[in-house]
Image (spheres, rainbow, N blue to C red):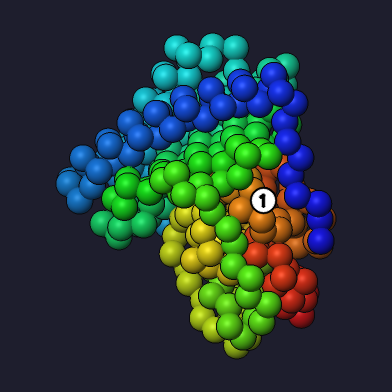
Amino acid sequence: MTAGPSALAAAVRNEALDLRTLAERLAREAGALQREKYETRIEIRTKSASIDLVTEVDHACEALIVAGLHEARPDDAILAEEGRGEDRDDARWRWIIDPIDGTTNYAHGYPRFCVSIGVEYEGERAVGVVYDPLLDEMFIAVRGEGASLNGRRLHVTQESKLANALVATGFAYDVRRSAQDNINHFIAFVKHARAIRRDGSAALDLCYVAAGRFDAYWELKLRPWDVAAGLLMVDEAGGRTSDLSGGPPQRSGFECVATNGPLHDQVLAILHT
Ligand code: IPD
Ligand code: CA
Ligand code: CA
């Protein structure tokens, strides 16, 4: 087992608590926009592949969040999926924004999507906020302070048998053309776990592991904004996160395994068969 996340130093912790409040406000505002435009006629375009969508609401939410950060935190670095941030190496605080995680769901009117905002302090995950606007579920984690859902403390499950586990995953947008397509892993878990879900939002998948709704989650080829908030949520809810070899998750989050802890080695073993 890896050690749990260490607490932040006192001064940094107080600043992190302020940033949590700011992130929560911006996530609620972006979420309100998503609710307002949900199932209305919106502009939808493609990005890296014909199955990789972006909507006008992704852009509007990102613009809202980035404008709020420019006003409140002009010195911080911002990495935002749709390209509005200015990422910098010299800033202590770095915001990582997924304005809509679950864009395919959003575009199809499938009610599973969220706003995800992660904040790093000197390269370490410090704050994570994920907001599901349809369920009005606000997931919040601060390093060393625990994870919560609408103010209720979150804990991972204690399940230790993969045969009893509900497991989640997802597929990257290059699934049609890449040999590293996650399909064999998917089949293996269909055979070994109780059931498997592919619900279309990596950030919510991770929050659901933290909340004990899922026992485990893995995915390959993620981007930093997919996992910046959710990985901290799992760590702070007592779970375990790693890359496929069991080492710490890559900071950029390309491959990720997140479990309740007892299942971690079994999940890694399946991923290596
Ligand atoms: C995607 C979702 C999906 C995951 C993909 C992500 P997007 O993010 O998180 O669940 O399987 O890997 O790219 O495009 O909806 O922000
Ligand atoms: Ca995403
Ligand atoms: Ca997105």
**Residue positioned 56% across, 72% down in the render:** 167
Figure check: 247 above or below 59: below
Which residue in the rendered view is the most extreme toward the left?
A: 40
- For badge 1, the amino acid type reads Asp
**Residue positioned 75% across, 49% down in the render:** 4
Rendering coords of residue 15 (x, y %): 61, 21
Q: Which of 214 and 54 is in front in this view?
A: 214
Q: In this view, does 213 lie to the left or right of 137?
A: right
Quarter where residue 99 is shown: top left
Instruction: Confirm whether residue 175 shows in the render.
Output: no
Q: In this view, does 73 lie to the left or right of 92?
A: left
Figure check: 3 above or below 67: below
Rendering coords of residue 272 (x, y %): 77, 74
Image quadrant in which the C terminus is located:
bottom right
Q: Is residue 265 left or right of residue 186?
A: right
Q: How many numbered circles does the render carry?
A: 1
Rendering coords of residue 76 (x, y %): 60, 18
Instruction: Confirm whether residue 72 shows in the render.
Output: yes
Question: Which element type, helix, strand or loop, lies under badge 1?
Answer: helix
Image quadrant in which the N terminus is located:
bottom right
Rendering coords of residue 161 (x, y %): 66, 82
Q: In this view, does 272 lie to the left or right of 150?
A: right
Figure check: 32 above or below 222: above
Quarter where residue 67 is shown: top left
**Residue count near mark 1 (Cα–Cα under 10 Å), binned few <14, some 14–19, many ≥20:** many
**Which residue bears the numbered disc 1?**
235
**Residue positioned 56% across, 61% down in the render:** 209
Q: Which of 154 and 186 is in front in this view?
A: 154
**Residue positioned 62% across, 22% down in the render:** 14
